Structure formats: C-alpha cells, structure tokens
Image (cartoon, rainbow, N blue to C red):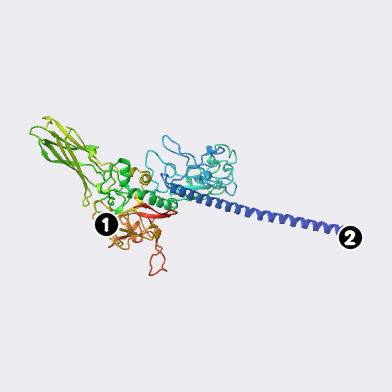
Amino acid sequence: MGRGRNRQRGAALILFLTVLVLGVAWFAVGALGKAMPATAEREIRTGHALQAAKQALLAYVALKAAEPGEKHPGRLPCPETPAQVGTSAEGRAAPIVSPPFPTCSAVGRLPWRTLGIAQLRDGYGEPLWYAVPTGSWALVNSSTVLDINPGLANQLTFDAQPNAVVAVIIAPGPAINGTSLPGTPPAGCGTVNQQVDRYAVPYDPAKFLECGNESGSYITAAPAPWGNDRAIAITASEVMDAIAGPVADRVQRQVLPALADWNQIELAATGKSWSSPYLPFASPFSDPDSNYYCGAAGETEGLTPLASRSSPNCSTLWTANASLVLGLSFLGCTQYADRVQCDFQRIFGTAPFSARIVATAPKVAGSFRGPLVAGDVTYTGSPTSTSLSFALSEATGDATATVDVTWPSTLASMSTVTVRVPHLQDAAVLSDSRVTWFRSNNWQRHVYYAVAPSATANSTSSCAAAEDDDCLEVVGLPDSTGNYWNKRLVLALVGQPTGGQIRSCGTYSDPDNPTVQDCDNVKQYLEAENAEYGTGPRVFRANLRIANPSAPTLPLPPFNDRVATCPLQYATDGGAVVICN
C-alpha cells in the first residue's frame, strides 16, 4: 500500500516537472517570437517616419516656392539648433544668423513645427535629425547671389559619394556605448558613449548620431555595432521636381505679365514710356551658362534678354557725333559713365549758332531699357531752342537720338557750350519684385523665350488671325484660357533632362544631326514641337494629351516643359480675367 503511494507520488512529480519544463520552453519560445517582430516593427516605424519626413520637407519647400514673396524658391529650412531644445523655439527652423555671413548649423533636429507636422520619431521614440549644406541650399549669403535653380548641384556626401544629395534626414536610434566595444571601429566611426548625458542641453549631435552622420559624411545605415542610425536623402532633382509647378505658376502670374507690360511699368515708375512699345528680341540660344542674355536684332526665339546695362556684353551706352554745325567750332563728343557729352566753342562767325548731335546706342531693341525724353537732355549756354527725336531700328536693334539745339546771338566769343545726353537706364521692370526673384536666382538659364514677330521693335506686321506667321501659337491649354493663336510672348520652363537629353558641352547623340558636339542644341532642353523650327506660325505645346491623334494608343514620349504665355485669361466667379494682353 505504502509502496503504491510512493509510485503515485513519483509519477505526479515527473508530470509536474514535465509541465514545468514545457511551460518554461513555451515562455522562452513566446518571448523570442515577440522579441524578433519587435525589432522588425521598430525598423518599419523608423522607415515610415523617415519617408513621412521627406515628403513633408518636399511639400514645405513646394509650398514656400509658390508664395509670391518668396525670393529664393527651393530654399530648404535650417535645422533646429541643439540650443533650441527645451525652449519655445523647439521644433522650428533656426533663424539665419549674420554677420559676417548668414549661417546655420549643418545638422540638427528636424524642424517639425516649421514643416507644419507633428513631431516624427523613429522606432525607438527618438525625434528625427536633419542635415543641409551650409551657405547654399538653406541660406542666402548677402555678399553673393544665391542661385537656387535646376543648375544648383548636390553638395552633401552620402554613402561615400561626394556631392550626392542636398539634405539628409536621420533616425538616431537608441543610445550606444562605443567605448565598450572590442576592436577598432570602422573608418568614420567614433567611440562616443551616448549612454551618458545624452539629453544634456544643448544636445551634442555625437550623442545621437554615429559614423559620419554627426560630422558631414552621411550614410544610409551605420555599421553595427558601432552605429544604429538610419537615414534617407533628398536630391537636387527631387527638390526641383517638387517646385517645378509652383515656379511655373509664378512665371505665368508674375514674371511674364511684368515683362509683357514692361512699358506700362516704366510709365508708372518714371513717368516716361516708349511711344511705340515693343518686346525685346531674344538672346540667340546657346549654352545657358555662358549666354549673354542680350537680344540680337531679328531673333525672335532663344533665351530671355534680361542683361542689365552694366553687362559688358549688353552695353547700351551712347556714342555721338555732331553735324550741321553753324557758327561754332566742334570740339568732339566724349563718353562718360553717365552720359555722352558734346562740346562746342564760339571762336568766330555770326549767329545763328546751332548744331545737330546724332547719338547711337546699340542693342536697345534687344534689352529692357528705359526711354529718353527731351527733358533728359541738358545744355549750357541757355539755348533758344532744342528738340529731340528718337528712333529704334528693327534691322539693327540700335537706338538713335537726334538733338537739335540753337544758342542765342549773344553767345560770348570764345565761350564753350555743351550738350549732355544721359545714357539709357535699366527699365523699371528689371527691379520689379515680380522679376527680381527670377533674375537673382538665374532662372533665365532654364527658360526659353519666344516673342511674336509682330511684337518686336518697329514691326510693321500684325497678329490678326489664326495661322498668321506673325503670331505665336500655344496648343494644349484649356479652352477657357482664350485663343490659342494670338500669343505675343511665350516663356517655356525647361524641366529636368528626359528622353536621353544631355545638357553639357561634351559629346552627345542627336538622331537628327549626329555631328553635333556642343550644348547649343535646343532639343537637349525642350521636347516635342517646342524644340522644332518649321514653316508657318510657330507652335508651342503646353502638354501631350494629344500626342498623335492618328495613333492614340501609342505611348506618349517624354515631356516635362511648362509653358507660360501672354495673353492668357482665367475664369473667376465674376467672369474671365486677362492676366496680360
């Protein structure tokens, strides 16, 4: 009997131990099962946070680019500085600091409040960090012109590739102790103990970022166990793609109306205007980086003629000579910085004392210059009569000013008299706020310019009907924008290279002209009809919704031009409003 009880107790103990072992095993398996998904889930959350931050940053840049007063569309916000943590400025882009030059930290936390989003954190609960090139994409250096446009290059090193990206967003992960790891860290990785004073204010980037992310050589993933950062980058092309629409809209609503109506702007600013308004001839198309942006007589297509009078290649300074001089000795005409001056002296002879001065300024019909009126010409000797006539030549693009002046019979013997003709000044449109952002960032390097022959200086032609060679046509716009055929000015914003385009002065392949070896081919910049010259009216295409009506099932070719034109109207509740006429 006692022996039976002992056997039962032994069996119960074995059963209990079996259940205990199975329970421990089950717990261990369950714990491991939960630990493995937890790491993966953290990585997934980190990836989602990085993607969300990138989209928010690009959206913010695009939104800012659309603002009419933004002077540098495409500018990136500065990171939050470590000193902002724990203050009312936390989460906001650091202000640009000067003097001597505007600057901000190259790396700091993501300015989530500035981006208008909730604070994003990685899978370990850490806020994201953010890096930008200092002095270029995020800043405006007051001592130089900052060109934020499609030609501005990547400037940050990423994954060992120099000049690869323009911004990096970094998930720092949990703190690690690099000082306790055995062996020598890989190149670029330090041995900081992030577990001590990680959150001491101001934050030290090295307490959060590793293996170059804290010092300017950024990487997608830091090598374990020396680092645990995860990063995502933004390239210059991605920024340009984000702002292409807003910039094109500003070209249509700001730049183009100002250029089209520049004579009215001049009248409002100076009280003077050209008696026969004109649009300047185009600067002949060539490599945009070396183009003079000065119109040439007879050129109706090319690049925008925005060169100022101070440009050595677009000088419109007067040169002069005198004719029909009566009773005076002509001493010559001298060109000064602000004027051309002709001098005369009475040595002998009798009245009338008179002279005609003929002054010529080159390239005026290919530039935006303010006009000259009679009151601008000054004289000495108290003349009894003066007159000024002014003409622009369609054939040469030059301006001619003819000044007739007569002095009184009381002009003293041996006295000297002068006639001063001031040089033409830059037209007010070049300093108009609607145009200055465009010029200061050199967007003219990325915009094609076309003017209708009927709108150039002293043109005797007119744009009267469809299929008129003196008009420009823009097809592909909604019918609500007005007639497609009566355009007098077109600005085509060039998109990113597509369809095999190569924008460099090296060798490239042109199916139509295999011998082309330079970058002066418009087909490397525009697509479809926009890059084609032909007979009949010049046609530009705003989109490729109808690429080939006879073969509608064929895939559309690459196309990313954005065309702005004048005149153009848009619909409002009160009816159609013309942007420019």
Residue at 59% x, 39% y: name it. 196
Q: As rendered, which of 270 and 308 lies closer to the eye? A: 270
Secondary structure under the numbered disc 2 in the rendered image: helix
Q: Earlier in the sequence, mark 2 or mark 1?
A: 2
Residue 198: image x %, image y %?
Answer: 58, 40
Residue 330: image x %, image y %?
Answer: 12, 36
> For the residues marked 2 and 1, what is the alpha-carbon distance in whole angstroms?
122 Å
According to the picture, the residue beneath numbered tag 1 turns out to be 462
Residue 66: image x %, image y %?
Answer: 44, 49
Residue 414 shown left or right of residue 309 in the figure: left
Q: Is residue 115 visible?
A: yes
Residue at 76% x, 55% y: name it. 20
* Residue 321 in which image quadrant: top left
For this orientation, the residue located farthest to the left is: 349
* Residue 12 in which image quadrant: bottom right
Q: As rendered, which of 42 and 541 lies closer to the eye? A: 541
Q: Is residue 212 visible?
A: no
Name the amino acid, label 2: Gly
For this orientation, the residue located farthest to the bottom is: 550
When the figure is inspected, residue 87 is found, relative to residue 300, above or below; the finding is above
Name the amino acid, label 1: Ser
Residue at 71% x, 54% y: name it. 27
Residue 280 shown left or right of residue 103 in the figure: left
Label disc, if present, on residue 4 of the rendered structure: 2
For the N terminus, give its image quadrant.
Answer: bottom right
Q: As rendered, which of 66 and 378 lies closer to the eye? A: 378
When the figure is inspected, residue 466 is found, relative to residue 297, above or below; the finding is below
Label disc, if present, on residue 509 of the rendered structure: none
Residue 181 shown left or right of residue 430 in the figure: right
Q: How many discs appear?
A: 2
